[in-house]
Amino acid sequence: MEFLAEYASFLAKTATLVIAILVVLSALAGLRGKGRRKAGGQLQVTKLNEFYKELRERLETTLLDKAQLKALRKQQSKAEKLQKKTPDEKSRVFVLDFDGDIKASATDSLRHEITALLTLATPRDEVVLRLESGGGMVHSYGLAASQLARIRQAGVPLTVCIDKVAASGGYMMACIGEKIVSAPFAVLGSIGVVAQLPNVNRLLKKHDIDFEVLTAGEYKRTLTVFGENTDKGREKFQEDLDVTHQLFKDFVSRYRPQLHIDEVATGEVWLGVAALNKQLVDELKTSDEYLSDRAREANLYHLHFAERKSLQERVGLAASSSIENTLVGLWSRLSRWR
């Protein structure tokens, strides 16, 4: 047991040293990058038709015998040569992804992707957004929705595919699509507004701790975590929530006029099948099925704007990963020694 204790101590010291070095490097990187402009990024474009073609060819190679495969390849070659002689200009489908957190952080990439595609896209083309989000901050998702509205304003068809969830701010984005395609068990709706916060004022009073809130403006602060909340403050806070909810309802109604908005704007959510009956979506289909169907008649291009991380951010990520791996390894060893 003495050896095991010494080994655990050695691992702890090593982890401490690694963490210290990474902290120093992070600090140096921060000083070095101070005053510089934020790092840019790069637009990555991938043709998805090739991806689907490789999947099909891989399966054909595995399942067909040599004679069958040879005949099939010969047939495909003839078809490709014929297509080159009589080229038929295919429409283009620009595929975007949005994986939303509470701050809609993916908007930073989405805005650049939309700016890029709008330089080339025409009404003959289509934009497909694969959207996953349970919602979050009103202003953050308002900006994300405004980015999608640029596509509609440019006259380019927009289709939104939802495989798992598009609720609250996520549905605010989805409703802009001319067509909403949902997986049968995706979660949709939650057209409502919620705000909640704890109040520890009675706990502070119990321990004889005073907390003062000074404001200039009658409603500069309505509800507070530490101060004593009043009925007047609660009423104003609720009024603000109601105003925001009405704006949300008006926004959804503008893009989905077929909805009975008062029936669906209750804050409830529905699975895809029920959402179709409520006209929250237009079709039940996974994004994979929709895109593979479109690949037969159009050229699909996946766009992703990759942010270039600063040295400080890269060091921070490396530090987090190193700390996590060290702690997991240490815990694993100690667990085996018990």
Image: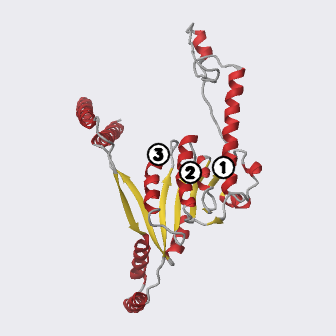
Residue at the (73%, 56%) spot, across then down: 259
Pointer 2 residue: 145
119 or 133, which lies in front? Answer: 119
Q: Quadrant of the C terminus?
A: top left
Seen from the viewer's position, the closer of residues 277 and 30 is 30
Q: Local crowd at mark 2 within 10 Å, few (<14), some, or many (≥20)?
A: many
Q: Which residue is mark 1?
A: 251
Distance between mark 2 and mark 1 Cα atoms: 10 Å
Q: Earlier in the sequence, mark 2 or mark 3?
A: 3
Q: Which mark is residue 132?
A: none
**Residue 114 placed where, x, y %?**
47, 58
Q: Amino acid at mark 3?
A: Ser
Cα separation between marks 3 and 1: 21 Å
**Residue at the spot of label 3:** 105
In this rendered view, identify the residue nearer to me: 15 or 266.
266
296 in relation to 197, above or below: below
Residue 130, placed above or below residue 60? above
- Residue 16 falls left or right of residue 140: left
Amino acid bearing label 2:
Ala
Q: Determine the secondary structure under disc 3.
A: loop
**Which corner quadrant of the image does residue 52 belong to?**
bottom left
